[in-house]
Amino acid sequence: MVSSDTALFRVAALSLQVILLGSHSALSQDARSSDDQWIVTLGGSVEYGPSYEGSRHLSFSGMPSFDFRRLGEAPEYSAPDDNIDYALFDIGDIEIGPVVGLRGGRSSFDDPELQGLHSVQWNLDAGVFAQYWPIENRLRVRGETRQALWGGDGLLADLFLDWFQPVGDRWLLSAGPRLSVANGTNMRNNFAVSAEEAANSGRVDAFDTNGGLKSIGFTVAATYTLSPVWSVQIYDKYSRLVGDAASSPITSRLGSADQNVIGITLNRSFQIGF
């Protein structure tokens, strides 16, 4: 049986293989028309952080990333915890469109102390994002609302505020606070403990949860442009679980409310036509 972190790491490794093997189709190839030409950016990240949400144990995991834009469109600044999106509408200065993301899971493979508690399966989610730049290419406000596609993992809503600061021709720094809200389904799946589970575990008491504010945090990143097609990014994502997420015995007894992830991402851009 393969743990959720192992599955995510394999997905990221496969993405990185695609990046490296596709170098012959770089942006330097001749363009036919900007109307049918796209710039696709694939990335593979390696992260070191909590083995699951609320864990005090740290482990390595992998995450893929993906972005695309029309040839000739300027690349838009983004943060490392942005999910995959595409702006379909511009209402005033507000961009709106679909967004998809990837959620990690947990099992007793991640932590033997979870024995007797239900597993949380890794998941894909989908929803809507909106973002607004009060100061163009500097200050960004972004919100995402995403529903899990299977497994009963519920609804998440995240709010981002970021400042982007270019340094010279190659560096881009970014930093900003985070806020995450979850509905009751998500909170129960990740932090509730039934009476039967408490009896089977012997380590925690039964605990029920409600929807509401789940975490607050801060994300910082530094991106270095190696060439027109290659870039590397290092980042740190800190969050503090609050409310029922922090009070849950899964967090307070077996884990930690402080969640910190450090990571590095390698990105490769390609020009493709349709």
Image: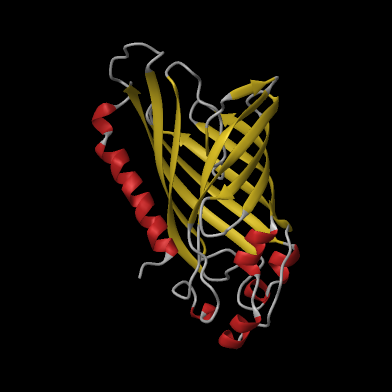
Tell me residue 272's x, y (percent): 33, 24
Residue furthest toward the top?
Answer: 33
127 left or right of 59 in image: right
Q: Looking at the picture, how far across and down is residue 56, in whole percent?
A: 58, 71
Choose between 258 and 202: the one closer to the eye: 202
Q: Nearer the viewer, residue 164 or 107?
A: 107
Residue in the picture at 25% in, 39% down = 21
Residue 22: x, y in percent? 27, 35
Q: Residue at x 57, y 39 (%)?
A: 79
Question: Compared with residue 173, is residue 154 higher up or lower down, i.e. above or below?
Answer: below
Residue 62 relative to residue 182: left or right: left
Of the 4 image quadrants, the one containing the C terminus is top left
Q: How is the image coloured?
A: secondary structure
Residue located at (64% from left, 68% from top) = 191
Examine the rendered structure and indicate whether residue 120 appears above or below residue 218: below
How far from the left and from the top, in percent, is residue 92? 70, 19
Judge whether 198 appears above or below 126 on screen. below
Q: Nearer the viewer, residue 141 or 2?
A: 2
Residue at 44% in and 38% down: 66
Residue 77: quarter of image: top right
Q: Name the quadrant containing residue 6.
A: bottom left
Q: Nearer the viewer, residue 42 or 224?
A: 42
Q: Quadrant of the N terminus?
A: bottom left
| Numbered disc total | 0
